[in-house]
Structures are given as structure tokens and as C-alpha cells.
Amino acid sequence: MRYVSTRGQAPVLSFEEAMLTGLARDGGLYVPETVPTMPPGAIAALAGLSYEEAAFRVMRPFVGDAFTDAEFEAIIGRAYAGFNHAARAPLAQIGPNHFLLELFHGPTLAFKDFAMQLIGQLFQAALERSGQRVTIVGATSGDTGSAAIEAFRGLSNVDVFILFPEGRVSEVQRRQMTTPAEDNVHALALKGDFDDCQARLKDMFNHFEFRDAVGLAGVNSINWARVLAQVVYYFTAAVSLGAPHRPVRFTVPTGNFGDIFAGYIAQRMGLPVEKLVIATNQNDILHRALTGGAYETKGVAPSISPSMDIQVSSNFERALFEAYGRDGAAVAGQMEDLKSKGGFAISQGALEFLRETFASGRASEAETTDTIRATFAATGLTICPHTAVGVKVAADQPASAAPMVTLATAHPAKFPDAVEAATGARPPLPKSMADLYDRPERVSPVENDLAALEALINERRKR
Ligand SMILES: Cc1ncc(COP(=O)(O)O)c(C=O)c1O
Ligand SMILES: N[C@@H](CCOP(=O)(O)O)C(=O)O
């Protein structure tokens, strides 16, 4: 299996190389050269398997010869052993034909654990084999950072630097990043928003001298392995609801477009997905792009679903690559316009392609709060504000016989203020985190300045 860049100019890589490389050297994102398919019989055969067994079957063709079957099986086993639900990604019914896919039973209580726990294991295996040491730099609006720190804390051949927007993550998210005591973990509070964090990260990848000197690696969803791990739960959920014999719809609370792009890959592999619905909060660039045809940035407005406070949605580039018939030059041109003009118009053909697969909707702040309240009243389930954005947008979709699955992307206890404002009750942290508020914090405030960030990382990384 080989991986190509969405901008068409970077070297073609193997799975392991693409995973360790992160952003392609032409600024693009790696995608598989061809998407392997699973025939209906193979999809039906996932029924009754454990999550780990299903994960092996779904992901195996993408990994090529990077790992033997036995190695890959063991890696998957270790990745999900720390989840606190036997099903890993259980479904809960919230309406006659509407289900929540609970993705918050991992160690940091968000869907990011599904991919991050796996790539933590994949990185360890690859680095042990090669004797390499890497510097991971990640940008986060709250959940990627804590999941990355959890997956890589204490590893001897990895330093982890996480950039988060100062004052724009929840207190629980911040403490998850600032309280680990391991000296390979560095939480950096950047003066700016998530887009600034992600832009500086991409600048570091595009500064080859720095990138090569520190052995820069990325664990944001620019990393293909992150997306791949997220493909699995689309299969397990759909099969539980009758796939491949019955199509299923998914609504995905969306920011950086990684999670929903994983759903698109599942569909390309042969999973009968009737529609993938992009659910945005008031930072609705993706909804505006899909409905109006222009991808135009405006400032990020802080919301009660802060992990989705994103305007430059990096994985949308992967969707555009498909929509433009895998024309890397066309994608590079649009990305250049995004950088220089703050936006671009999507061609009619590409827009039609996107609308075939994706629908979209937006939830305001008030609608998000109302949805948390109404879901609790109707079902007794407490949902996080990101999930609530999804539930609201799912409810707005046209009727269909296909079951609707909304991805429940985080545990409500990560966002107690928003949940309490809606329901009157503060969701408690699970026992494993009960002392989170008592642990000492360690964080470095940083300016939104590339040279200063690079200097700090270079000085602190171990050699
Ligand atoms: C809780 C939560 N929900 C939804 C999202 C959006 O996911 P994606 O960025 O993959 O679109 C994020 C951040 O990524 C998140 O942390
Ligand atoms: N919402 C994310 C933003 C980064 O997304 P990623 O999937 O590209 O890592 C977060 O919580 O950090």
C-alpha cells in the first residue's frame, strides 16, 4: 500500500513512512493511492467480532508490510486494553431511528483516544525498530492534546509539545494537558486561537531545516494513521444496525474534518453509508461551503463546544482532492488561495461530488444548550456540547428509513459548565480522574511566533 500527497508533488510513501512523516513535504496530506474495498460478505462477517478483531480486518489492507499480522494484532490489543467499556464504541438509542455512537470510553474521554492510543503503539513499534527519536508537535483545541499526551507520556524516544489556545479550552481539557509530570511532555499555551496553533504547526513542517533537525512528527489528523483508526467504528456501528444489508446515516460533529473523512473512507471501502452529515457549531465554515460553494474564513468565535472552534479545517483538503478527481495541482491552487486570499470558490463539479456524499447543518449556542437539556429530559442521557451539535443537526435531516447514528465525541464531564448550564447538574469526572483538580499544573505561555516556538522546542527537546 502506497500513499500519495493531496498536492501531488511529495514523494510517494509506505504506510510507516507516511505515519512518521505527518505533513507531506509539498504541504499536502497523505492519502492511500487506492482505497481497498471490503465485499459485502466480508462486512457481514464483522458481526459478532470484538472491536479489536474488527479493527484488524478493516485496517489491515492499509498497513501493507509495515507490520506482520501478529505484530499488528498485538498492537491493536494493547491500544484498546485501557478502554473502560467492553464494546469500546457502544451504541445507545435516543430516538425511534436515532442512535449515539459513544466514543468517549477511552483514557482521556474523547474519540481521539481511538486513534491516538493506536498510533502511540504504532510509533513505539516503528521507533524501537529503527532506533529513531522524534519530536512530536501537536495543535489542539482541547482533545487531541490530552489524548496525544496520554499516548506518548514517558516514552524515552519521543518528546511531545502541545500547542493549545490560551483560555479557549475547558478547564478539564487544560488540566489533562498540564498535569502529567513526565519530563517528555510540554504543554504550551499560545496567545491566539486553534487556527493559529495549527498554522504554526504547519509552518514548522514547511520549515525543512527545523523539521529535519528535530525529527518533527505530527499526530494531528494530518497524519493518515489517525484517520485510518477512526474508520473502524463506522464499520462496527453500521454492522450492529444491519449493514451491509441496510444502509446507515452518520452525523458527525465536525471541526478539522478528520472524523467525518474517516466515514467517507468507510463508504469508499464499501460500507453502505447513505449520507455523512457535517454538524458544525457557530464556526460554520464547512456548512457555508457546502451550501454556498465558497470556502471563506472569518474569525473563530469561541463557543460552548470549544473543540470545534476551527475555521481552517485541515482534512477538508483530503475531501477536495477526491472532489477534484485527485488533481493535486487544483488542490494546491485552492490551498494557495486560502492562504493568500482567505478563501476560494469550489468548482461546480467538485461541489456536486461533495453534495453526493455529504450534507451539513449548524447549531447555534442556544440550540446546543437546548439539545443537551432536551436529550437529558427525553432519555436520561447527558451529552457533551459537541455531541449536542450533532444531535441537533441530525434531527434537522430529511426523514429516511436508514438509521441515523450521531457520533458522541466526548464525555460530558469534560465540559461541566456547558452541561450544568443546560441541565442544572454537573457531570462528575470518572474515578481515574477524580483528583484532576488537585494535581499541580505545568504550562508555558508562548507567543504566536514561529521563531520563538522553534527556539523553545529545540532547547527543551532531549537529544
Ligand atoms: C469533542 C470533539 N468533537 C468533535 C471534534 C471534531 O472532530 P474533527 O476535527 O475530526 O472534525 C473534535 C475535535 O477534533 C472534538 O474534540
Ligand atoms: N478538535 C481537535 C482539533 C485538532 O484536530 P485533529 O483531529 O486534527 O487532531 C482537538 O481537540 O484538538
Image: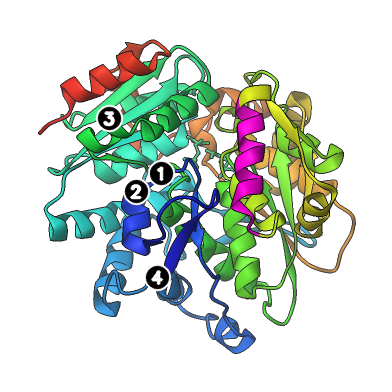
Q: Which residue is mark 4?
A: 52
Q: Percent position (x, y) of residue 151?
A: 29, 45
Residue located 77% across and 38% down the image: 289
Q: Which residue is mark 1?
A: 25
Classify mark 3 as within 8 Å of ligand 2 or not, answering yes or no. Answer: no
Rounded to the nearest angstrom, the CA distance separating label 1 from label 3 is 13 Å
The answer to whether mark 3 and mark 4 are in CB contact below 8 A is: no
Which amino acid type corresponds to the residue marked 4 in the rendered image? Glu
Which amino acid type corresponds to the residue marked 1 in the rendered image? Arg
- Predominant SS of the magenta segment: helix
Quarter residue 201 falls in: top left
Q: Nearer the viewer, mark 1 or mark 4?
A: 1
Horizontal placement of 62 versus 277: left or right?
A: left
Q: Percent position (x, y) of residue 297?
A: 69, 25
Rounded to the nearest angstrom, the CA distance separating label 1 from label 4 is 33 Å
Rounded to the nearest angstrom, the CA distance separating label 3 from label 4 is 38 Å
Give the mark, 1 or 3, whose residue is nearer the N terminus.
1
The answer to whether mark 1 and mark 2 are in CB contact below 8 A is: yes
Question: Where, quadrant-wise, is the N terminus in this rendering?
Answer: bottom left
Quarter residue 62 falls in: bottom left
Is disc 4 surrounded by few (<14), some (14 to 19) or many (20+) residues within 10 Å?
many
Q: Which residue is mark 2?
A: 21
Give the mark, 4 or 2, whose residue is nearer the N terminus.
2
Is 344 in front, or is 72?
344
Tell me where the magenta segment starts and ends, as one range. Answer: 326-339
Q: Secondary structure at mark 2?
A: helix
The answer to whether mark 2 and mark 3 are in CB contact below 8 A is: no
Is disc 2 surrounded by few (<14), some (14 to 19) or many (20+) residues within 10 Å?
many
Q: Which residue is mark 3?
A: 210
